[in-house]
Amino acid sequence: MALGLFGRLLSLSTHGLPDEFCSLLIENLRGKKFCQLMTKALVYDHREDSSVGGGHDAQWSAGVEDLIRDAGRNVAPRSLFPFTRTGQSSGVFKVTHAQLVELMVIKVGSDGSKITANFLLDDAKVLAAAPPSEDQRNQHVTSAEVFGGVSRGLLQLHNGERANKIWKCILLPYLEETIPKIPISIAGAYFDAFRYGIQYSDSQSFLALTNWVVENVESSIWQSTGNNESNDDTSTDGNDSSTANVGSEGFTLQSKYLYLASALLVELDAYHHSRDIHPWYTGKLSNAPSYQLGENVEISKSWRLIKEKLLPLLLSSVGHPYENCRDHISGCLFRIHSYKKRQELQMGKKFDDPDVTKMIVSRLASAGDLNGVSLKERYNSLITARKFISYSIYLGDAKSDFNDLILPLLPMCFESLQTTVDAQSEVKDDVDPAIRALEADVFKGYRYTVAEISVSCVLSYGRHEDLSNVLNVVKSASKNRFWQVRQGAAHFLRCFEGCHKFLFTDDQSNVARGIIASLLADERREVSSAAMSALTGILAATPDEKVKVLVDRYVQIANRSRIRKRKNKKDETQQDMTEEERKSKQEKEERRSRNQQASVFFLCAAILAEPYDTPPYVPVAIAAVSKHSFEKSAPLGVRDIIKKCCSEFKRTHMSDNWELHREVFNQEQLEALEDVVSTPHYYA
């Protein structure tokens, strides 16, 4: 209650009352004891969180809970933070606490702000180093809230070189002492504190912070040596001579610095070069002024630090052995691309070469290469690339980011679906089981990624060449020697065709159908079944007139491709054949077998595509496939598909409305259906 009343008083005095009426308030804000009391009050204000005390809500008397909730709303005015697609990382960081600290710093003015800031940060250091206790997490989070409020308040009062001196003298020493001490579970609170502190500030005002973050990343991050033998050891134990920090503690510190770099890039990306610390919507919501900064972002020091120092470090650490670091590296790479793209749009021109986006995509596209790196580093690089693609899907712009980021990496996604645990693999069998487990995680992750791309990326912005490029990639993947890749191509095309059915041109629809038709005759049952499922969905959304034409064509192929009974005379002359004749006959038999499987699977897909109706072409297809349901006319795999297809047709059609469906059949077609679906008995 007292904290809420103080927040309301501070808000009113900041926006309305002159300083001569607030002398007592300003005097207390400049006092060390008052600052200590405020930080303690902020810690105690966290005790109402339901996550403390076993997850149970606090027990209050009737009406007291409403009073406390109303008081909490008066701690600070409403805020639109974070106002980006990247929300808060921590669920316990209270923006109102940071706002309250910010108002305290602003109220004392530019002269007294340094004194108040030092008092508050001294108390925050004590909170960050708090020993284990019930309130330890609350104390750690409060230290982040104090830092966020102090840094934002100081940046409101100082800018340019003065702001950078504030960073070097007050704020950065606090970070150097605090960041190594906090547990990794509290890093999300400092992520939010960083973002709140520099939100809406131009890059020149926190250039010292940018430089500090880049230097710490440079001095601590793991680097690939490019040596296969040494990497096998360092990727497991972290004992490489080029690694600054070894062990889990060193990787944890790296994760913290990368996390802070990500927060820095998020706010750099959200900043518009044509305004000052006030956001773009202040012109509609308030009378706050806005003016042109005139900063050339292309040659700004912040962008040079990111492009020349941070980006090469991240690209060389793509195969990082620590999962949290890989996640932060992929996020930083995406935000560097996003920052560069946004600034190019705002400035109306392209940045100088080298192109940052091409550098990122080129490095990630080669993540699966085994050029002087260990298997473990290769798989770690693939995991980083997959996380980068996820950022591009869910945080990127479909119109530009799909063409710039996702489409160039799509071939790598399909190639990552192959596995070494297969007879087709050339990798030795004596591979470490840990590598096998990591490979399984990569394979599973890329199956999800391919599915995400096929469903989430809808190319509805009018560029038909992008659709054609995707189909070309899928067509290439459908011819891969690994059956897992071909199966992934079938599943991808099933979803991609469904999402873009009404965006495809006729030529693109024919290409997609041709890819699926080529996979129907695949030697692997998994691939042909996936292709048949994809074709069923495609035919279900195709007009009946087009399906009828296709069914008539495949009926002719099916009739010509049945196994014919061989005559004894031909069998006797097998020994008299030359090698060329025997090879030609074998090729002819293989071609017949592929045609039989492809035609039968296509006709079965056409039947299954109509679960509730019976168009005229369905009885024709049933009559054609029934001829392949006998042992003498087709192999087991084809016969099994026919029986399952006709059984499904019987389940969906031969029930209450069977009399209506039966009118479409003639007697010969009904007998063909009965030959397949009827149950054989003893007296047959």
Image (tube, rainbow, N blue to C red):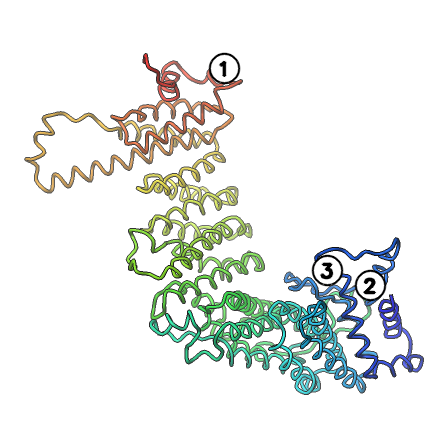
User: Which residue is label 2 attached to?
Assistant: 72
Relative to residue 620, is residue 562 drawn left or right?
A: left
Residue 28 placed where, x, y %? 87, 81
Task: Determine whether the residue tagged by mark 3 lies in a helix, strand or loop.
Answer: loop
For the question of whether residue 200 can be seen, the reply is no
Residue 529: image quadrant is top left
Report, in whole angstroms, how far the alpha carbon at label 3 lies from the one at label 1: 67 Å
Q: Is residue 19 above or below residue 485?
A: below
Q: Residues within 10 Å of mark 3 (few under 14, many from 20)?
A: few
Relative to residue 189, is residue 626 drawn left or right?
A: left
Residue 55 placed where, x, y %? 71, 56
Give the residue type at disc 1.
Glu
Residue 533 placed where, x, y %? 43, 38
**Residue shown at 33% from the left, 29% from the top:** 639
Quadrant location of the N terminus in the rendered image: bottom right
Q: Nearer the viewer, residue 352 or 441?
A: 441
The numbered mark, 2 or 3, whose residue comes first in the sequence reads 3
User: Which residue is label 1 attached to?
Assistant: 659
Residue furthest left in the image: 576
Residue 53 image label: 3
**Residue shown at 33% from the left, 42% from the top:** 524
